[in-house]
Each structure stands twice: as structure tokens, then as C-alpha cells.
Image (cartoon, rainbow, N blue to C red):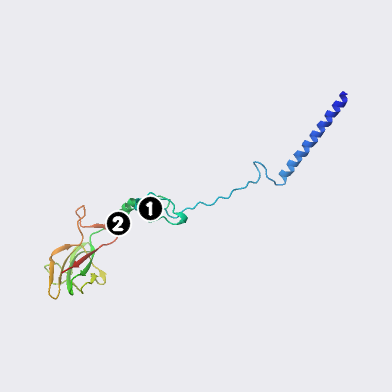
């Protein structure tokens, strides 16, 4: 009886070993055929949509709260200041300070003459301008010359004063005019400054380019 039980136990063990060997063979076969293997086989990479990177970031105008945010649909944000490369957002006040810091100082202005009278007028002008580092009167010094730049203007017309086809720049002028029945001599013997004194007491102004002074002659 004991031999029969022992025989049955040995037979059962042989069946277990046989089944276990088949299972291991099957797992090994899949691994060699290039199937998916946990921790060491081929892995699926999910597809990610690329993030939108705007070319410019702008501070919203009018002091709004949306400064620096990305404009919808890839468009640039509404009026504001472009950020330098690197994504730094510049506020409107900072941009103004930067523009002022990079502007130049000028001590002369271009001169435009306007005839707002009802008659044709001839203007006479002497200009005080810088020439090769020295300040001079052109075409001559007041009280010492009978020369003057002259311009004829019809009623309602204006023009920028020129010499040799170049606009004339001056710090101050002497100017007078004559019409058919009237003369304007307010600044014939008095200087008219085109450039005011700044906070430092100098006759200069800060700007990106030379400004223009308009002398408007009225009745």
C-alpha cells in the first residue's frame, strides 16, 4: 500500500515538473522572438503637441492686467512694448525711460514759416547757428549787415526755411516781414529763441531727431 502511495506521489511530481518546463519554454520563446518585455523591451512613446512659443511678448496698453500674456491664436498681443529676446517683459514706463536715455540732446531746431495773414508777405530772416564748433549769425550779424534770407509766401502758405536745398537749423533768429500795407517788426531787433532753457539752465532738448519750430505770422 505504501509503495502504491509513493508511486502516485512520484508520478504527480513528474507531471508538475513537465508542466513547469513547458511554461518556462513558452516564456523564453516569446522573449527571443522580440515581443514586449517588462522593464527591458520596446516602449511606446506618447505623442505630445508642441508648445506654442510666441515671437514677441507685449505689455498690454493702458496699464491693463494682461501684460506679458500670450496672444490667442499665435497673434501678437495688443499695443504695448516688445520684450527683448529672452522673454523679458518691459513695461511702458520702462520703455519710455529707455527711449529717453538713448535720445540725443539738440540745441537747434528747424524753422518753418507760415503766413496766416490775408495778404502776400515777404519774410526776412537772420539765423544764429553752430558752424564747425562756433556760433555765428547767417548771413550776417544783426546791426552790422543789410543781408537776410528772404521768403515770399502767399496767404495760408507755409514752408520750411532752406539754404542750398538743405533745411536750416537755428537756436535763435531775427525775423520780420512786410506786406502790401503792413510790416511786422516785433523780432527785427529782438532775438526769438527756438530752443528754450531746460531744467539745467542750458538751451537744449532731448529727442530722437531735430525738432521743428513753426513761426506763424498773423494779422
> Is residue 6 at all visible to an observer of this figure?
yes
Q: Is residue 219 shown above or below 72? A: below
Quadrant the C terminus occupies: bottom left
Q: Nearer the viewer, residue 195 or 71?
A: 71
Query: Left of 81 or right of it: where is 24?
Result: right
Q: Is residue 13 shown above or below 42? A: above
> Is residue 145 at all visible to an observer of this figure?
no
Name the quadrant containing residue 29: top right
Residue 12 image position (x, y, % from top left): 82, 31
| Total marks in image | 2
Residue shown at 81% from the left, 34% from the top? 15
Residue 13 image position (x, y, % from top left): 81, 31
Label 1, label 2: how far apart the Cα atoms are: 24 Å
Residue 66 image position (x, y, % from top left): 40, 50
Q: Nearer the viewer, residue 51 or 190?
A: 51
Residue shown at 87% from the left, 23% from the top? 2
Residue 5 image position (x, y, % from top left): 85, 26
Amino acid at each position: 500500500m505504501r509503495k502504491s502511495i509513493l508511486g502516485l506521489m512520484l508520478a504527480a511530481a513528474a507531471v508538475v515538473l513537465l508542466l513547469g518546463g513547458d511554461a518556462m519554454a513558452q516564456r523564453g520563446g516569446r522573449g527571443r522572438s522580440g515581443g514586449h518585455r517588462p522593464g527591458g523591451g520596446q516602449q511606446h512613446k506618447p505623442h505630445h503637441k508642441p508648445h506654442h512659443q510666441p515671437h514677441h511678448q507685449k505689455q498690454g496698453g493702458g496699464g491693463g492686467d494682461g501684460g506679458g500674456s500670450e496672444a490667442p491664436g499665435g497673434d501678437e498681443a495688443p499695443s504695448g512694448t516688445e520684450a527683448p529676446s529672452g522673454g523679458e517683459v518691459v513695461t511702458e514706463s520702462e520703455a519710455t525711460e529707455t527711449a529717453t536715455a538713448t535720445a540725443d540732446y539738440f540745441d537747434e531746431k528747424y524753422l518753418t514759416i507760415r503766413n496766416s495773414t490775408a495778404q502776400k508777405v515777404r519774410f526776412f530772416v537772420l539765423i544764429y547757428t553752430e558752424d564747425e564748433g562756433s556760433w555765428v549769425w547767417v548771413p550776417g550779424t544783426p546791426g552790422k549787415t543789410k543781408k537776410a534770407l528772404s521768403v515770399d509766401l502767399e496767404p495760408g502758405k507755409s514752408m520750411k526755411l532752406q539754404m542750398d536745398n538743405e533745411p536750416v537749423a537755428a537756436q535763435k533768429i531775427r525775423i520780420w516781414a512786410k506786406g502790401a500795407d503792413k510790416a511786422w517788426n516785433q523780432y527785427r531787433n529782438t532775438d526769438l529763441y527756438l530752443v528754450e532753457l531746460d531744467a539745467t539752465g542750458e538751451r537744449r532738448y532731448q529727442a530722437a531727431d531735430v525738432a521743428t519750430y513753426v513761426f506763424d505770422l498773423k494779422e
